[in-house]
Amino acid sequence: MLLSRNILTRASPCARSVLWSNQLSGSVPPELGSLSALVNLQLRANALSGSIPDSLASLTALTYLALDTNALTGSIPLKIGNLSSLRFLCVHRLRSRSQLTPTHAARPV
């Protein structure tokens, strides 16, 4: 299933999107960044490719982001490290390069 053509990108506001291991392919749609109420986004263990869109850094309510075990490439957008609500970021097993530093992860909980 192509994520970019999925109804999720046109959905009404939701707080949680768990699409773990659903054989999703294609790129992560930048439109996900407009789901401002999103708190939990799990796209792990799919076949997603392309880069991680900068628009995910617009998800200011996001506390949990899991993109691991995909074929995503490029850099992890630094602005994701500035999300003050983000408590869990899982990006292992990606082809991406991280420029996030311990400073980005060293916020008090």
Image: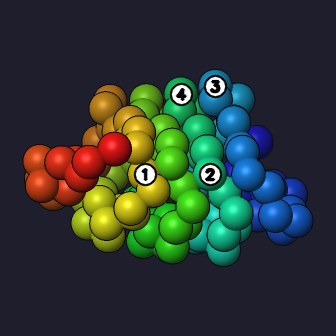
- Residue 32 visible in the snapshot: yes
Check disc 3 and give the amino acid type: Ser
Whether residue 67 is visible, yes or no, is no
Give the image location of residue 77, x and y in percent: 31, 65
Give the mark nearer the N terminus: 1 vs 3.
Answer: 3
Measured in 3D between alpha carbons, the distance from the residue under mark 1 to the one under mark 3, in whole angstroms, is 22 Å
Amino acid on which the number 2 mark rests in the picture: Val
Secondary structure, mark 4, is: loop
Residue that badge 3 annotates: 21
Q: Nearer the viewer, mark 2 or mark 4?
A: 2
In the rendered image, which quarter contains the N terminus?
top right
Q: How packed is label 3: few (under 14 Cα within 10 Å), some, or many (20 or more)?
A: some
Disc nearer the start of the sequence (2/4): 2
The quarter of the image holding the C terminus is: top left
For residue 39, the mark is 2
Residue 22 occupies quadrant: top right
Q: Amino acid at mark 1?
A: Leu
For image coordinates 72% across by 45% down, the residue present is 16
Q: Are marks 2 and 4 in contact (CB under 8 Å)?
A: no
How many angstroms separate mark 2 from mark 4 (CA)?
Answer: 19 Å
Q: CA distance from mark 2 to mark 3?
A: 19 Å
N-terminal of the pair, mark 2 or mark 3, is 3
N-terminal of the two: label 3 or label 4? 3
Q: Earlier in the sequence, mark 1 or mark 4?
A: 4
Q: Are marks 3 and 4 in contact (CB under 8 Å)?
A: yes
Give the SS element for disc 1. Answer: loop
The residue at which mark 4 appears reads as 45
Instruction: Say above or below: 88 vs 23.
Output: below
| Disc 1 target residue | 86
Q: Residues within 10 Å of mark 2 (few under 14, many from 20)?
A: some
Q: Which mark is residue 52?
A: none
